[in-house]
Amino acid sequence: MVTGSTTTESLQCVRCGQDQNLWQLSPRCTACGGLLAVSRDLSEYDATMLRGAWAARRGSLAPHDRSGVWRFRELIAPLDLDEMTARGEGNTGLYPTEELARWAGVASLHLKHEGENPTGSFKDRGMTAGVSVARKLGARTVACASTGNTSASLASYAALAGLGCLVLVPAGEHTSAAKLSQALAYGARTLAIRGDFDRALVLLQALAPELDLYVLNSVNPWRLEGQKSIMFETLEALGWEAPDWIVLPGGNLGNTSAFTKALLEMRELGLIARLPRIAVVQAAGASPFAASYAGGWAPLQPVRADTMATAIRIGDPVNHPKASAGVRALDGVVTTVTDPEIMDAKALVDRAGIGCEPASAASIAGLRRLCKEGVIGAEERVVAVITGHLLKDPDASSRYHASAAEHANPPTEVDADERSIRAVVRGL
Ligand SMILES: *Cc1c(COP(=O)(O)O)cnc(C)c1O
Ligand SMILES: [Zn+2]
């Protein structure tokens, strides 16, 4: 089994096909500016051996074995064990949810709860890989544009690795205070940009070479290699039996790209016998990918994004070439949901005792819509990915439960005496 320097990986441009230096600072093709993808010679590996090695590592106390990313290191990044900056990411729960399944309209629904990662979102799986590579490359400062979670995660892993960290977030109400507080607290140099996420990412990519920054947005191919572990872990937990559908929210489309790549690799390796289909859900106010899909994969037209699901408030998704190829390869679909639909679905995910931030609930709202439309059948088995923790956006929950919405559960204020409490609890 391969670790360290006997590398089967290469880095290729998905646009012009050029081979690039595996260990380069530029996250994009140096010839044409296209997206880069890590490819590897899978004939080196045997499914039975991989399953055995991955299962054995779960019993180890070593940080790189216990990590739900590095446990799968053969398919993540060819680093030596001491090059891995890990903090116990991954190993998240996969919860069967009968009531939600009924509400959505399917026979079986499991939620993969990525909010259980160290900084509260799946971004940690990408950052453990990306920051480890940054260290190997000798980068001094890592950087990202972010709607909140990417900056929270990068700031934490940069602190752990002893690297400088610069983050650009939209100024004002469109960045959740909880996420921003993480970036500040973990010590990132934080710029609140008077503009949206898409603008921040354009600015960062333009300035990165001059300012000597290693960019760790999902344009970075190693981030996506780390995020593939969500699928490895899910399929392992299901005994390597693919569900019928994987449902996830789509913003910058990093996860869509990573998941489809992981599933295709698993199929090629024989880790799974058949592929699930994939359903990507966008907020109606930030749905250029859904529009491209609906137009028979028409060229993506960027939009000015608007949704209260801030983590998917993205109008020009950087990974769309990889994501559209991946969705096509898995015979997938792309749909949209409104903000009120997202918030009702969130209330039910929350009430199931699991909880999520608004963007994550787009999965469940979208699943329900696809069931109603007959795209997903009542007998099908579904895994939906919950991308971020409930506490990532407490204001959204508070506002919902103070409103007249269907599943609102507002507090009851009472006088501070026994009689008043008794009266309320007994419903008098
Ligand atoms: C980043 C993020 C998304 C969007 O994921 P993409 O890979 O950019 O499509 C969705 N939900 C949450 C909670 C996120 O942090
Ligand atoms: Zn190229």
Image (cartoon, rainbow, N blue to C red):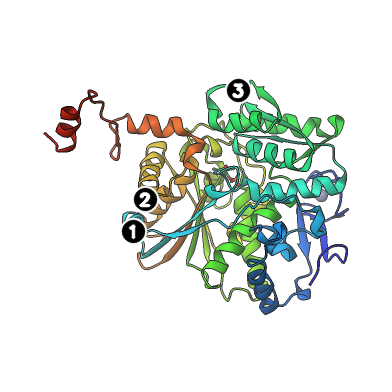
Label 2's element?
loop
Find the distance from the CA under tag 1 to the CA under tag 3. Answer: 39 Å
**Looking at the picture, does residue 353 appear above or below residue 154?**
below
Type of the residue with mark 1: Gly
Q: For residue 371, which quarter of the picture?
A: bottom left
Q: Circle 1 is placed at which residue position?
A: 105
Instruction: Work out whether residue 295 or residue 234 is closer to the camera in this orientation and state it.
Output: 234
Q: Circle 2 is placed at which residue position?
A: 352
Find the distance from the CA under tag 2 to the CA under tag 3. Answer: 33 Å
Instruction: Report the residue at 75% width, 49% height from top.
Output: 85
Q: Is mark 1 within 8 Å of ligand 1?
A: no
The single residue placed furthest to the front in the displayed view is 418
Q: Position of residue 113 (x, y in %)?
A: 50, 52
Q: Circle 3 is placed at which residue position?
A: 171
Instruction: Report the residue at 71% width, 45% height from top.
Output: 219
Q: Position of residue 284 (x, y in %)?
A: 46, 39
Q: For residue 3, which quarter of the picture?
A: bottom right
Instruction: Report the residue at 67% width, 57% height from top.
Output: 69
Find the distance from the CA under tag 1 to the CA under tag 2. Answer: 16 Å
172 relative position to 97: left or right? right
The C terminus lies in quadrant? top left
Crowd around label 2: few <14 · some 14–19 · many ≥20 (10 Å): few
Mark found first going from the N terminus, 2 or 3:
3
Label 3's element?
loop
Query: Is residue 176 something one can see in this rendering?
Result: no
Query: Is residue 198 something one can see in this rendering?
Result: yes
Q: Is mark 3 within 8 Å of ligand 1?
A: no
Q: Position of residue 239 (x, y in %)?
A: 53, 73
Type of the residue with mark 3: Ala
295 relative position to 373: left or right? right
